[in-house]
Structures are given as C-alpha cells and as structure tokens.
C-alpha cells in the first residue's frame, strides 16, 4: 500500500532522512519509532505529499506521490504533528468543511461527518467551538478530520504527544478500533505507544532505519541476550576491563555510582557463573547480581544510542 524507495531529504546541506526504504502492506498498523529529530515528521510530510524529497520515490496504492498527488491525497488521511486549528469553527462545521475539501460526494458528506464523529466519540461536543475544547478533545478532532473522507491510509504523526495518561489511553483505544479498516502508520518517540497500537515497528534514528520487525520478532531477537545489574562494594580498578574480557559478556557499562555496572550477556549460565566467580573470588563484596531478559525498551535504547550514531 505504501512503498518508500531510497528516500532522502536534506534541509539545506543538512541531511534529515538518509536513503530509507520500507513498505507497508494493506491493512497493517505500523509504528514509526524514533527519538526527537530522527526524521519521522519529515518522512510523513513526504509520504503525504506536503513536501518534496531530495531523492527517492514514494508510492501510495501504486501512485507516485509527485506524479499523481491528487490520487494519493484522496487516499490518505493525515494527522500532522501540529494539527491545523480553525478554532472559531464548531467541530461539526469544521468536519463538513474538511469533507467537502477532500471531495466527499455531496450526498454523502453528512453521513461521513456523522461516522467520523461517532468513531472519535465527539458527539457530545459537536456543536462546540474547537478553541474551547481541551487538548485531548482537539486531538480527537484532528483524528476525526483525518478519518472523515474514509481514506484507505491514515498517517498519524505523534497522535498522543502532549496528552495526559487518560487521554493517551483513549486515543490508543481509538486507534485500535481503526485497525482492519485502514492501513495505518503512526509515529512516536515513545515505545509504549508502539506496543499498545502496532503490529510492526520501523525504528529510525538520525535519518536512518536501524530496525524493522514485528513486535514479537524484535522480542525474539532480544531474547538471545540478557541484562545484568551488578553492584559490588569494593570494585578494583581493573574490574570493568575484566568483565569485558569474560567469555559471553557482550557489553559493560559503568554506572554513575562507583561499583555499579550494567552488562549485556549471552544466554548461558556459565557466563553468570563467571561474573559471580570473578567478583566473589576477588573479595570485592558482591551486593547485587540481577539477571533479567532484555525488553523492547532495552533494545530501543541500544539502537538509538552511541554505537548507532547517538540520540539527539
Ligand atoms: N524545516 C526544517 N528546516 C531545517 N531543518 C529541519 C526542518 N524540519 C526538521 N529539520 C531537522 O531535520 C531533522 C529531522 O526532523 P523531524 O523530521 O522533524 O524529526 P522527528 O519528527 O523524528 O522529530 C532534525 O534534525 C530537525 O532539526
Ligand atoms: Mg516529529
């Protein structure tokens, strides 16, 4: 449904998106996850035809975004990072306005508006001025305008940013209800958003895709390694280097607290034994040795920190 091929975008001579390619199949809900400044908004603006790429191409439903912008725009509902505000319109008037703008056939406009209002639970406030609504309701209006033309594809740029936890839960619930009715790409800089709403995730950092998989696939890949929290009372100067030298120890990071380390290790019991042996044998005063499975949060942080170019 969406094909992004070798896409790059520079602002002046600063690259924001560097040669990314990905596909989104019909009916999928895909999370576009990355820290602030990763290039999510830039990519979404290009997919929706609001901005031209520096290089590469984007097809939506087989149509090239720049050769057939109208075909593409008629198939996409877009919730921009900062939704347009027509504060002095009522919710309903605004949705009628957007539906007509998107060329919904005249006789169907009223039904389409009513459906969008129903799906986003805006019935109680449909006569209210948008400017008098809370942020959570305004965000639902943003979703309603994306939905109102019943587009095949929804592009949602950070749909829950700035909302309180209850409003966040409501929007996530709404997005889950849209599954199966649209192909959805939503961007976010927080992992729980993806876990709550998406089947597949594309992780972007510094304009490049660093991982792409189903949530289960990412977890499976992660299960090959484990995280160890280690705390010792009397660390020797060489301890960090010694830990790094142990067979099965993949990474060692010293924490701010002296004697506290975080390690990434393989799945073998022998590796844990060796760590314990080293610390106890050296009489360093073992205070904590906690081994746990790596979660998605660990993976995300790992992917977007220094070795991959550094978070911004
Ligand atoms: N209009 C612009 N002019 C110059 N640089 C920009 C502009 N918009 C975004 N950038 C830069 O491009 C990079 C990617 O930004 P953006 O796509 O907004 O990332 P994200 O949405 O993931 O936070 C950032 O370094 C940002 O500062
Ligand atoms: Mg953004």
Image (cartoon, grey):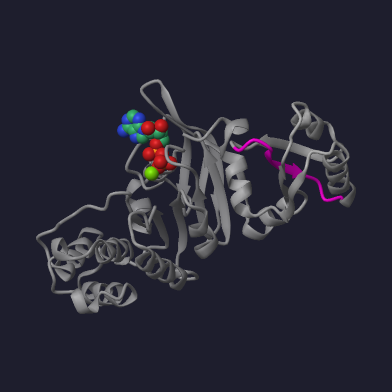
- Residues drawn in magenta: 257-268
User: Is residue 1 visible from the viewing direction of this image?
Assistant: no
Q: Judge by depth and name the residue closer to the eye, 198 or 19.
A: 198
Q: Residue at the top extreme?
A: 13
Q: Quadrant of residue 39?
A: top left
Residue at image location 27% in from the left, 74% down from the top: 117
Q: Judge by depth and name the residue closer to the eye, 290 or 162.
A: 290
From the viewer's perspective, is 98 left or right of 66? Answer: left
Q: Judge by depth and name the residue closer to the eye, 312 or 183.
A: 312
Name the quadrant where ligand 1 sits: top left
Q: Quadrant of residue 234?
A: top right
From the viewer's perspective, is 309 left or right of 141? Answer: right
From the viewer's perspective, is 112 left or right of 91? Answer: right
Above or below for 104 versus 261: below
Above or below for 92 versus 255: below
Percent of width and height locating residue 270? 90, 48
Percent of width and height locating residue 11? 37, 27
Let me know if residue 311 is in the magenta part.
no
Q: Residue at the left extreme?
A: 88
Percent of width and height locating residue 292? 72, 55
Percent of width and height locating residue 282? 85, 36
Residue at image location 62% in from the left, 48% down from the top: 298
Residue at image location 47% in from the left, 54% down from the top: 61
């Amino acid at each position: 449904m969406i094909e992004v091929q070798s896409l790059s975008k520079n602002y002046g001579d600063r690259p924001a998106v560097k040669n990314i390619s990905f596909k989104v199949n019909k009916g999928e809900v895909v999370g576009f996850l990355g820290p602030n400044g990763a290039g999510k908004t830039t990519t979404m603006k290009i997919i929706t035809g609001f901005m031209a790429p520096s290089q590469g191409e984007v097809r939506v439903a087989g149509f090239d975004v720049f050769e057939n912008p109208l075909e593409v725009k008629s198939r996409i509902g877009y919730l921009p990072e900062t939704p347009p505000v027509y504060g002095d319109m009522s919710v309903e008037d605004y949705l009628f306005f957007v539906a007509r703008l998107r060329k919904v056939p005249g006789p169907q406009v009223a039904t389409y508006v009513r459906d969008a209002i129903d799906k986003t639970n805006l019935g109680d406030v449909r006569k209210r001025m948008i400017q008098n609504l809370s942020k959570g309701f305004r965000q639902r209006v943003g979703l309603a305008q994306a939905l109102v033309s019943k587009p095949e594809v929804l592009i949602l740029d950070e749909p829950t940013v700035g909302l309180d936890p209850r409003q966040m839960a409501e929007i996530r619930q709404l997005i889950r209800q849209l599954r199966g009715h649209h192909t959805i790409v939503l961007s976010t800089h927080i992992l729980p958003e993806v876990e709550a709403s998406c089947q597949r995730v594309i992780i972007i950092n510094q304009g490049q895709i660093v991982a792409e998989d189903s949530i289960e696939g990412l977890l499976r890949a992660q299960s090959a390694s484990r995280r160890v929290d280690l705390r010792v009372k009397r660390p020797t100067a060489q301890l960090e280097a010694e830990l790094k030298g142990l067979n099965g120890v993949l990474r060692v990071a010293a924490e701010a607290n002296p004697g506290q380390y975080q390690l990434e290790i393989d799945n073998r019991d022998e590796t844990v034994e060796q760590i314990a042996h080293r610390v106890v044998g050296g009489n360093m005063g073992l205070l904590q040795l906690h081994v746990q499975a790596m979660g998605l949060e660990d993976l995300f942080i790992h992917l977007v920190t220094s070795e991959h170019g550094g978070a911004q």
